[in-house]
Amino acid sequence: MLHHISIGVRDLALSGAFYDAALGALGYRRVFEDDTAIGYGVEDDKDLLCLKLRDDASAPGPGFHLAFAAPSHAAVHAFHAAALSVGGSDNGAPGLREDYGDHYCAAFLIDPDGHRIEAVINRPEPSTS
């Protein structure tokens, strides 16, 4: 349904470091950047999330969050740890959320501008045997 989403940030370098860590753990990367924006996705010049430098940036209210698809349970854990290491705030440790479903594994963070984000995978972890 969505082609991409843009969010305003007050410090592009700080937010870039945060999203490099958080989204890198999920397999996403910078696909473009300039002096006022950084785009993330999987293909060059095709951003799925764009950070836009704005002096007046503020996060939406408490009912809004962005959920990013994770490729594995391990990636959910890596997303959380990586983002915390660069200044993110914990908003829910990684793990199963059985009230959302039997296989719903997620972690929740708050970015440097107050945006609430989540990494989620909603399928069973493949067996290792």
Image (cartoon, grey):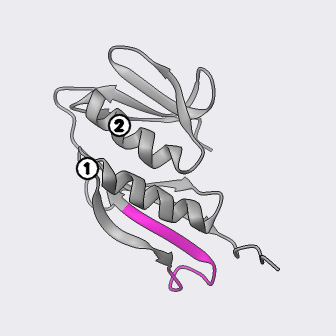
Q: Is residue 73 left or right of residue 33?
A: right
Residue 106 position (above or below residue 114): below
Precedes in sequence: disc 1 or disc 2: 2
Residue 105 within the segment the image draws in magenta? yes
Q: Which mark is residue 17?
A: 2
Q: Residues within 10 Å of mark 1 (few under 14, many from 20)?
A: some
At numbered mark 1, what does the secondary structure look like: helix, strand or loop? loop
Residue 49 position (above or below residue 110): above
Q: Residue at x 33, y 18 (%)?
A: 36
At label 2, the amino acid type is Ala
**Whole-percent x, y for residue 38 in the image:** 42, 26
- Between 87 and 109, the one lying in front of the other is 87
**Whole-percent x, y for residue 87 in the image:** 25, 50
Q: Which residues are magenta?
A: 97-108
> Can you name the residue that lies furthest to the top here?
35
The answer to the question of whether label 1 and label 2 lie on touching residues, with beta carbons closer than 8 A, is yes
Q: Residue at x 47, y 56 (%)?
A: 79
